[in-house]
Image: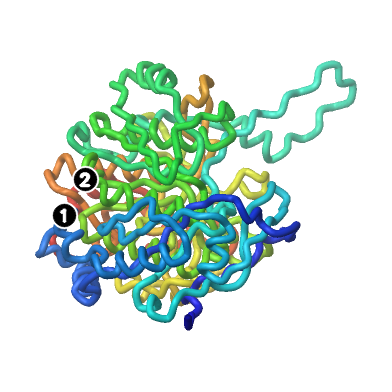
Amino acid sequence: MATRRLKGSEKSALPNARAIGPADQHERLEVSVIVRPQAREALAERVSRLTRADRSEGPLSREAFAAAHGASSADLAAVKAFAHLHGLSVVQEHAARRTVVLAGTVAQFTEAFSVELKRYEYPDGTYRGREGGIQIPEELEPIIEAVLGLDNRPQALAHFRIRKPAPKRRSGARSPPAQPSSAAKASASAVSYSPGQLASLYDFPQQTAQGECVALIELGGGFRPQDLQTYFAGLGVAAPVVTAVSVDHGANQPTGDANGPDGEVMLDIEVVGAVAAGASIAVYFAPNTDAGFLDAVTTAMHDTVRKPSVISISWGGPESSWTSQAMTAMDQAFQAAATLGITVCAASGDGGSSDGASGSAAHVDFPASSPFVLGCGGTSLRAAGTQIASEVVWNDASTDGGAGGGGVSAFFPVPSWQQGLAATTAAGARSALSGRGVPDVAGDADPETGYDVRIDGTDTVIGGTSAVAPLWAGLVALANALNGRASGYLNPLLYAHPAALRDITQGNNGAFEASAGWDACTGLGSPIGQQIAKVAITTES
């Protein structure tokens, strides 16, 4: 049988990883196969109109999208026939998500896709992985667009930072005290806000988001209902209805470690629940793999029961850590979300302009770098009473406290609504964008001006762009409720109406400097909530 290499499937080992032997040939795993959409040209034209802020058609219903642009029955049948030929079982097929989930052993998948699966050891543990590309039958080359899950390395990091405690002064010291470090100075001036206080400072609409559902994508950890009851009772806000949705066997499994993924899950729920009271929250738990991440996103998008109108994602990683097939498949999912009228918000990362990648080169975080995602960057905010006194780029990198991610994509081209923009480097040079610029918007993310939250029974303060994505998602849910319709794909509208945001012009995130207008640190700026809600119902730019 003639085979072809699946475009964009090439993979290399993680940095500092080494192969320690073959994968267990009897190990069972599940793999997600993504197939092409129906009527691709018509779908592309609809998406193109949305990028031009043309909303004359209105969003497609989930049912209409599935019928027009889901996978065809013939394509699904072709993948299933391939699976049966190699002894693989079909555990799930979903036409709207264009996904077939196959199950089998390492030996069966090795033979089916002509890959060599090995065990790898790296500083944070071990994983099952592969190097090189995936082979698929020649006749399936036009049909299959991605094969995800053969490799189970952690795909993404949660983008939150727990505030470090202030250094304690030693008692009984005889020598004069040393000059305080920058970390100590920062802790001495630290402040924190409830999500509701930040919503007020950002002029969010003063109403409920009753009837809206916000989806949260989580790749580990969990929440405890009692913690949520205690937290929201303390705020004087009714606790939201929170539903855990299992994807690829993921589950609500609190670890008891606030510094682990529980911190992300609880932060997301508490921010959305506090700023968008009345909205229901659906938490889609999935494994932290490329397959799990995509499956969680598409499951949320095509959920015909809960029907979320906003998706918040606080997980991601440098573009360089993704295969191009995975980024392309995820971006296609976000394009589909745009046609469904779903707004997708994603954190831009906490590693500054390097996004935490090895070396000093600039990187941006995916999925925030998708042109169909509202990339959410970070600021440091100080208030005076009920007003914002100052807001600058978040950058505590000198004290290992993190910095807002942002820069220029090496994978996605410049979208139409960013044409003509330039990034300002820390050296003061201006350079026209060579790729999609990140982020689009910003909000308070500095742990030293962070969010009051409750995690695993403990009240604490958290920052990071992980808090900004649910903050914006909550704002969008409020706008949806206020306007009586979904805001949908906001990026083109926001770039056409920059006065709806508070421009941030001071600070840097490493390689890039804030400047008037859009910049690669805080995008267009932080929200003026009432203005954002008005922009969201604009029908053209």
262 vs 530, left or right, is right
Disc sitting over residue 63 in the figure: 1
**In percent of the image, x 63 and y 33: which residue is there?**
164
Element on which disc 1 rests: helix
Cα–Cα span, label 1 and label 2: 8 Å
Q: Identify the image quadrant of residue 276.
A: top left
Front-most of residues 38 and 265: 38
Task: Categorize mark 2 by other alpha carbons within 10 Å: few (<14), some (14-19), many (20+).
Answer: few
On-image quarter of the C terminus: bottom left
Q: Which mark is residue 443?
A: none
Residues under numbered marks 1 and 2 in contact, where contact means CB atoms less than 8 Å apart: yes
Residue 230 visible in the snapshot: yes
Q: Earlier in the sequence, mark 1 or mark 2?
A: 1
Q: Residue furthest bottom?
A: 2
Give the image location of residue 368, x and y in percent.
43, 57
Taking depth in this image into account, of 200 and 352 the one nearest to the observer is 352
Between 386 and 326, the residue placed more toward the observer is 326
Residue beneath the point at 69% across and 47% down: 125
In the image, what residue type sits under mark 1?
Answer: Glu
